[in-house]
Image (tube, rainbow, N blue to C red):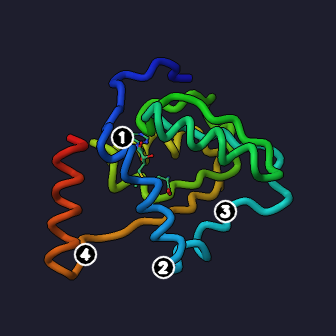
């Protein structure tokens, strides 16, 4: 099991802007794709490295019936034993991590053989204005 967060992730501008962006995404139809956890789920470990977004995740987790532990960490060093999870949910995170291969290898490590990976992701926007905004957010995050 990997425990320490190797690199703190802060992204302060993104962390302040994202809750409003997220509400806009939900209103735009993404909510339908975010119905992640059926009633049969007994436990979720949520990993969020940015302090402000982690606090928001903790507050959101209190509002839903599935038991969720929100913890600090990064996708490339998950605080979980090998083959200890039935499923992994990765929502708009692979666009944010510095090393997608490392994140996916780590997810594979913690999933049991035959475990499920559900991911929600986006590509570069078609519109020039949105694409510029995506690049600006990437620069801010890097
Ligand atoms: C676009 S937001 C998506 C947030 C949320 N998962 C959702 O679907 O609304 C990207 C998220 O990835 C997180 N993140 C950034 N770098 C990360 C890393 N190395 N490992 C795990 N999460 C990371 C950010 O802090 C942020 O919460």
Mark 1 surroundings within 10 Å by alpha-carbon count, few (fewer than 14), some (14 through 19), many (20 or more): some
Q: Residue at x 39, y 44 (%)?
A: 15
Mark 2 or mark 4, which is nearer to you? Answer: 2
Of the numbered discs 2 and 1, the one sitting upstream in the chain is 2
**Residue designated by label 3:** 36
Of the numbered discs 4 and 1, the one sitting upstream in the chain is 1
Q: Residue at x 69, y 35 (%)?
A: 69
Residue 28's disc number: 2
Q: In this view, does 142 lie to the left or right of 63?
A: left
Mark 4 or mark 1, which is nearer to you? Answer: 4
**Residue designated by label 1:** 102
Residue 111 occupies which quadrant of the picture? top right
Of the numbered discs 1 and 3, the one sitting upstream in the chain is 3
Residue 125's disc number: 4
Q: Does the residue labelled 1 lie within 8 Å of ligand 1?
A: no
Asked if the residues shown at circle 4 and circle 3 are in contact, with their CB atoms under 8 angstroms apart, the answer is no
Of the numbered discs 2 and 3, the one sitting upstream in the chain is 2
Mark 4 surroundings within 10 Å by alpha-carbon count, few (fewer than 14), some (14 through 19), many (20 or more): few
Where, quadrant-wise, is the C terminus in this rendering? Answer: top left
Query: What is the CA distance from the residue labelled 2 to the residue labelled 1?
Result: 31 Å
Query: What is the CA distance from the residue labelled 2 to the residue labelled 4?
Result: 15 Å
């Amino acid at each position: 099991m990997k425990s320490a967060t190797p690199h703190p992730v802060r992204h302060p501008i993104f962390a302040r802007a994202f809750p409003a962006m997220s509400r806009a995404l939900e209103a735009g139809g993404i909510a339908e794709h975010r119905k992640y956890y059926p009633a049969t789920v007994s436990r979720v470990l949520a990993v969020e490295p940015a302090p402000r977004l982690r606090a928001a995740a903790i507050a959101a987790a209190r509002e839903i019936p599935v038991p969720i532990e929100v913890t600090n960490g990064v996708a490339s060093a998950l605080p979980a034993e090998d083959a200890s999870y039935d499923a992994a949910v990765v929502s708009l995170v692979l666009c944010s991590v510095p090393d997608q291969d490392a994140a996916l290898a780590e997810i594979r490590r913690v999933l049991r053989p035959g475990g499920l990976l559900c991911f929600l992701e986006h590509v570069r926007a078609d519109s020039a204005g949105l694409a510029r905004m995506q690049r600006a957010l990437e620069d801010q995050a890097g």
